[in-house]
Image: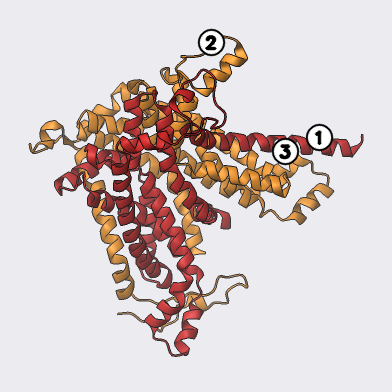
Amino acid sequence: MAIATAPPPAATAAPPASSPPTRRRRRAWGAPLLLLLPSIAMLAVFIGWPIVQMVVMSFQEFGRAQIFGAPPAFVGLGNYVDVLTDPEFWAVLTRSIALCVVSVAATMVLGVLIAILLTRLGRVMRTAVSISLLLAWAMPALTATIVWGWIFGTQYGLVNWVLTRITGTDWTGHSWLIDPVSFFAVAAIVITWGAVPFVVFTTYAGLTQVPDEVMEAASLDGAGGLARFRLIVFPYLRSILVVLLILQIIWDLRVFAQIYALQSIGGVREETNTIGVYIYSVSMASGDLGAGGAISVVLVVIMLAISGYYIRSMLREEDS
Amino acid sequence: MNARPRRLATRIALNATAVVVILCSLFPVYWMVNTSLLPGSAVRSSTPHWWPDQFTLDNYRDAMNEGLPAALGTSLAVTGVTLAAALVLAFLASVAVSRYRFRSRRTFIVLILVIQMVPAEALIVSMFRVLDGWHLLNSILGLGLVYIALVLPFTIWTLRGFVGGIPVELEEAAMIDGCSKTGAFWRVTFPLLAPGLVATGVFAFIQAWNEFVFALVIMTRPESLTLPIWLRAFVQATKATDWAVVMAASTIMAIPVIVFFLVVQNRMAGGLVSGAVKG
């Protein structure tokens, strides 16, 4: 049973001056288990069980007949073979990755630049920029998408009006969403607009940790602005930027609401599906849950592979 | 070369860039509210109205007549269930994780982190089937249960930081003064946790309020749509003809989130990247 009084041997070994206040390090399992039980039960039933079902289903023939009660037959790797040999799957995957790369690149570059800009602004201006970024960040993805859809509207949209004024040719009636390339350009703008604030605030928090003395010393040694950034600021920021990059990749690979809503406003679904929306349309609209399950498993594997570093760096904080 | 004019030029350039950033981030939010306050005829005119010069609240009334109240009610109910249950569960779990050291503690934390990386899109298929089997489709309880599980990892992760930030010594001092162990926790630690509970609650609220994918799959009947799903369907139904009403509905959906978000924004960035910032 629990040995509540025994001090853990390692914890007593002379902590450094800056260590956090010592926590109660009790070795017990009864009380914590009881406290964790409700959460574990919820996660097991509503996340764990569906994950198990997803994997099982991906090895089954599971179509409309099975939804209405026919027993599903195991087909081994059949669903995976079907999915991985389907050119549409690869088109969808390529599209998702391309959208992700463009959005993440734009988000990271703009985010870091605006964060640097924040460090060089006066107080009033910095507060004004922060507040407006906060508002953009707070905007729900769905409403943001709809508003951008209105700004790029076909008939009375603002973009078409501005372009008509500037270019002199009549843009009224030009649809931005019907053509897949400009559809994804709009999607990238929506995603980037919503994602930049998080990158700005996190990067800015990192930038303020760079000690002033080090920067002064560097400029006394003759380092110019670019050299100071590359040699001093960047090493400070690197781990933050890597984590931001991973989070952005994960979030942008799994965009759903934005794409689905833009399609409702005026896109051609077949030509603009990304992986999340594709899973939805294969399994819910076409009713092929087996194939949907197989694609889901592929997506989960991709996600976990990308997020490995993130999980490890979050655990590092736990262990410190 | 004289340094002063050059410095002035730099400052002007920096401030000009800042103004561009402000305009770009604010404009869509402004445009949503502005459009929602204009009559449909003004919105459908060949020149844009830059401010609500023909102020009207008709769009909000029209949105209310299009089924928005029912969706609003469903969203509020589901969000309320999620918020209450997730806070209680996350509170218990975070006390366990940050006040005790037990063997499977690390496993639990890894689990919490990994679960957050599983995309909801991948789960829609099996979630649909599992809930269908339990007759929980189209029910507030069903969606609420899914949302509780969905927000739990993040709420536990956040609350854990708050609980860990309160020194155990405070409790111990109270115990020396004659409090029981439980009494010390409820009288000393728990009140100090209030800001943490508020922040975590707001996260749970925002996540449940905005959630789209599961609501789309689970709530399919017209009378059980949540606000985001109703809004999406309304946009498709009106197909770019009634932007004024759509913007009014969007404003109704966005305002609570924006208000709550501003309350807790300081904590938002910290929780997600704390490991990296600490290096």
Q: Which residue is mark 2?
A: A170
Amino acid type for the residue under numbered disc 2? Asp
Near mark 3 (Cα within 10 A), the count class, few <14, some 14-19 or many ≥20, is some
Chain of residue at mark 2: A
Q: Secondary structure under badge 1?
A: helix
Residue found at the very far top of the displayed protein: A169
Q: Secondary structure under badge 2?
A: loop
Q: For the residues labelled 1 and 2, say whether their Cβ atoms are less than 8 Å apart.
A: no
- Spatial distance from mark 1 to mark 2, Cα to Cα? 38 Å
Amino acid type for the residue under numbered disc 1? Ala
Q: Is residue A78 left or right of residue A108?
A: left
Q: Is residue A239 left or right of residue A292?
A: right
Residue A23's spot in the image, x, y percent? 48, 74
Among the 4 quarters of the image, the one containing residue B197? bottom left
Which colour is chain A painted?
orange
Residue B96 at least partly seen = yes
Residue found at the very far right of the displayed protein: B1
Q: Is residue A225 left or right of residue A283?
A: right
Chain of residue at mark 3: B
Label the red chain with its letter: B
User: In front: A264, or B174?
Assistant: A264
Q: Identify whether B137 is placed above or below A86.
A: below
- Spatial distance from mark 1 to mark 3, Cα to Cα? 10 Å
Tag on residue B9? 1
Q: Which residue is mark 3?
A: B15
